Amino acid sequence: MKTQRYDRSFVLDYEETDEGYLTVRAVVTKPGVYPYQRGDGSVQYELKHLEDIYSDRTVMSCNAKPITDDHPREPVNLKNVKVHGRGFSHSDAQVKNNGVMVTFTVFDEDLIRKIREEDKREISLGFETELVAEDGEYNGQRYQYRQTQVDVNHIAIVDKGRVGPEAAIRGDSDAWQIDSNQKQNGGGSTMAKLKIDEQEFEVPSEVKSKVEGLQAKADSYDQLKKDHDTTVANYDAQKTELDKKKKELEDAQKAEPKQDAIDNAVEARLSLLDEAREHLPEDFEYKGRTDSDIKVAVIQAQDEKFEAKDKSDEYINARYDATMSFLKDSVQTATGQNNMKFTKTNTSDALDQKRQQRLNLRDSK
């Protein structure tokens, strides 16, 4: 079942065309939680969720809609638009300025006079909506219903509401919302209940409306402040992350090995391979072995009981250097079974020949 609603905002400025028409551009509705006054003076809070208000259906429904002088007592349609129509909205409705904005032109001379001379400048959006009972909270404000399937029927220019501009939240957020079931003219004063500090008071509905309108303004300010604080916090967090990434990049650039270091590492690796090949089997697999692995293999070739587990790199390096020193001394002073002593010169030549053979074998691979 569709429920009629009237949202209020203001004609803040207008332009006069060459023909004397008035052209106005205004925000006619915004997302948020807004109070709607029932016929008995009580208030219910309804949610205009941005998914509903900013939907193509609702935005497009603001285009090409009649402008009326006050709200007619019936929906405006083809059969009565000549009676009620005082202008039309343009086809430029769009989401802008945190709401739905549209341009409209008033071409009725009497309504133009009222806008100019009588300051009749409140805009009241007439629309129908499917109200869904939904108790929740939106941007820190409680609500009991959610407006869905919003279809704009007309845009009315109305006199200043009984609540007055103080209770208005500019463009759907500052304007008092009036339930279509409430009487628009005359009638007695209806007493409403207003709760202040957990205590209820009976006050005229106009007073209740004004107080709640002011409270809505305060809530809006609080929400803006929260949004601002959240934005600042997000900015600070992103800046901290950016600074961290810059520092990591700088450290990585500083830690990048220089060409001299690379050359030295390559030379040391080749020298180690040359030394190791003199004392390891020809089928020993060097690929994928670290310098420490190769040194351990050389040590174990001389001492099968050597266990490298839990030994530090410093220990292995020292043990390797000692082993190589021992091997070189042994080669230079070794004697055979017949106690024939090999001279240092002959042994050196033999080692050079073996080294050259190994180099040729490595190059051939």
Image: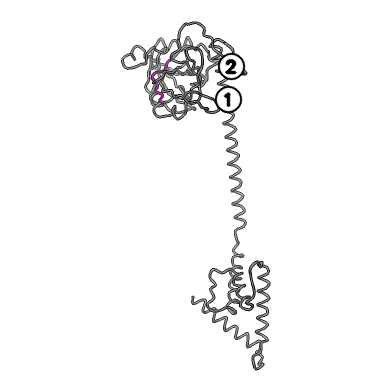
Is residue 152 in the magenta section?
Answer: yes
Q: Nearer the viewer, mark 1 or mark 2?
A: 2
Residue 326 is situated, as x and y percent measured from the top left of the image, at 68, 80
C-alpha distance separating marks 1 and 2: 21 Å
Start-end of magenta stretch = 149-156
Residue type, numbered disc 1 = Tyr
Query: Between residues 250 and 219, which one lies in front from this camera angle?
Result: 219
Is residue 43 in the magenta section?
Answer: no
Q: Please say if 359 is above or below 80.
A: below
Count of marks placed on residues: 2
Residue marked by disc 2: 195
Image quadrant of residue 217?
top right
Residue 50 is situated, as x and y percent measured from the top left of the image, at 47, 29
Compare marks 1 and 2 and give the one earlier in the sequence. Answer: 2
Instruction: Give yes or no for contact between labels 1 and 2 (Cβ–Cβ under 8 Å).
Output: no
Residue type, numbered disc 2 = Lys
Image quadrant of residue 152?
top left
Q: How is the image coloured?
A: one colour
Label 2 SS: strand
Say which residue appears at 45% left-offset and 30% top-offset: 51
Residue 280 is situated, as x and y percent measured from the top left of the image, at 58, 78
Say which residue appears at 61% left-offset and 43% top-offset: 240
Q: Please say if 91 is above or below 345.
A: above
Q: Which label sits on residue 221?
A: 1
Query: Between residues 164 and 340, which one lies in front from this camera angle?
Result: 340
Query: Between residues 234 and 215, which one lies in front from this camera angle?
Result: 215
Asked if residue 305 lies left or right of residue 181, the reply is right
Say which residue appears at 45% left-offset and 25% top-offset: 100
Label 2 neighbourhood size at 10 Å, few (<14), some (14-19), many (20+)?
few
Q: Quadrant of the N terminus?
A: top left
Main secondary-structure element of the magenta-colored stretch: strand
